[in-house]
Amino acid sequence: MTSPALYTSTRGRTRGVSFCEAALMGLATDGGLLLPEALPDVRGELSGWRELSYGALAEAVMRPFVGDGLSAATLSRLVSASYASFSHPEICPLQPVGPVHIMELFHGPTLAFKDVALQFLGQLFEEILGRSGAELNLLGATSGDTGSAAIAGVRGKAGIRIVVMHPHGRVSPIQERQMTTVLDDNVHNLAITGTFDDGQRVLKEIFNDLAFRERYHLGAVNSVNWVRVLAQMVYYFHAAFRMQERCGCERIQVCVPTGNFGDVFAGYLARRMGAPISRLVVATNENDILARFFATGVYARGEVRQTSSPSMDIQVASNFERYLYYRLGGDSEALVALLDGFARTGQLSLPGRDDDFAAGRASVGETAEAIRDTYRRHGYLLDPHTAVGVAVGQRFLRPDEPMVCLATAHPAKFPDAIREALGEDLARHPAIDGLRELPTRCTVIPATREAVQEFMRCHLA
């Protein structure tokens, strides 16, 4: 008989949460983020996993975290349905590009890495709700790609409605149209007059209003939802196995363009489980709070700068709390004290160095140069977020450990950045071209808890 997989909050007051409860809960009821009570050591499984297809590997990686929440047959069905929408048979293929290897995570329906997790999360929500006949109202905040991927994952699904906040005028026009051209009755787009950090603040304030949360059956699609992290862990194992097969290496490095720390945190957990990854390289744009932290141990909030890689224009990384929990040895009291201090002063510090990570930043100019150089030398087109990763990743090359850079979006989603770098329109994709003439629906709204809650009362009642 399969034993349950249980989850606990980083803040220590929410415990014993099942896998399905964790999926629906999103943010823990004590305001923290959910993590598994135990992290399996899978080093003994790696040789058996190495030859698996991506779907079979996803089942193997997820199985210990699902426990008795889903049968093996149900998990297999959900995984198959999730990745049937991807256009490449390998799901996340690797391409050698000069001194690095690019893992393309953009072959899903919205051409962004968020599809890898959100296609699965949408299938999982439908499965769980179908058992009980319950309804779920999803609330999300996006810096660009999460919104469209979440909408694609749940549009038209019975029992699910979704409200997505994006920062007005601070996502790319194509990212905006990928969201606002979806006119399904269960989809609502809000353009908030603020930054993505404002959206995350409003999201957490609403989830911490427990009476409102319970009345409206709220769930989360942001990477505060544990299932997002779990689904992303799979491709770190996949990258390592494919590179071992290709290069005969023992371990790899992985460079991750990041703003919210969710994607790279998935790699951190995969490494802790035993994935053959020597080091994770955190790549940021000019919003470099994470790069500064890994260089100095000081996490200090600054002003959000608009850059050519808008999905990373973030100063407060929501998943960083999960990482701090591990750095503090699971001491929830110490974590809460640290976070309280950060809320008051905008700064926290941790002594010591974490050799699991290296980090760097790339300016807008360096990002454009990475796009130019990669295209001219290798004929490969990078989106600006992936270009940040390539620019930073090349600073940390090792002769015996190949560098895998995660390609987080298709370049066609950011034609202005490509045009700025190369002087011509080279970034095209038929799925993007078809958006231009479609009607849109969106509501511009203040970036306050009260305004968003009032919208939800009117539209979700």
Image: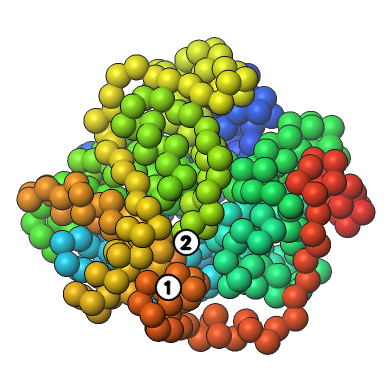
Residue type, label 1: Glu
- Residue drawn at point x = 29 percent, y = 36 percent: 357
Residue 347 sits above or below residue 171 on the image = above
Q: Are marks 1 and 2 in contact (CB under 8 Å)?
A: yes
Between 259 and 147, the one nearer to me in the picture:
259
Location of residue 258 in the rendering, given as x and y in whole percent from the top left corner: 42, 48
- Residue drawn at point x = 62 percent, y = 82 percent: 435
Q: Which mark is residue 420?
A: 1
Q: In the rendered image, which quarter is residue 186 located in? A: bottom right
Residue type, label 2: Ser
Between 348 and 54, the one nearer to me in the picture:
348
Judged from the image, the secondary structure of the residue bearing numbered disc 1 is helix
Is residue 422 at all visible to an observer of this figure?
Answer: yes
User: Which residue position is annotated with label 2?
Assistant: 308
Q: In the rendered image, which quarter is residue 210 located in? A: top right
Judged from the image, the secondary structure of the residue bearing numbered disc 2 is loop
Q: Comparing marks 1 and 2, which lies closer to the viewer?
A: 1
Mark 2 residue crowding within 10 angstroms, few (<14) / some (14–19) / many (20+)? many
Mark 1 residue crowding within 10 angstroms, few (<14) / some (14–19) / many (20+)? some
Location of residue 73 in the rendering, given as x and y in whole percent from the top left corner: 49, 57
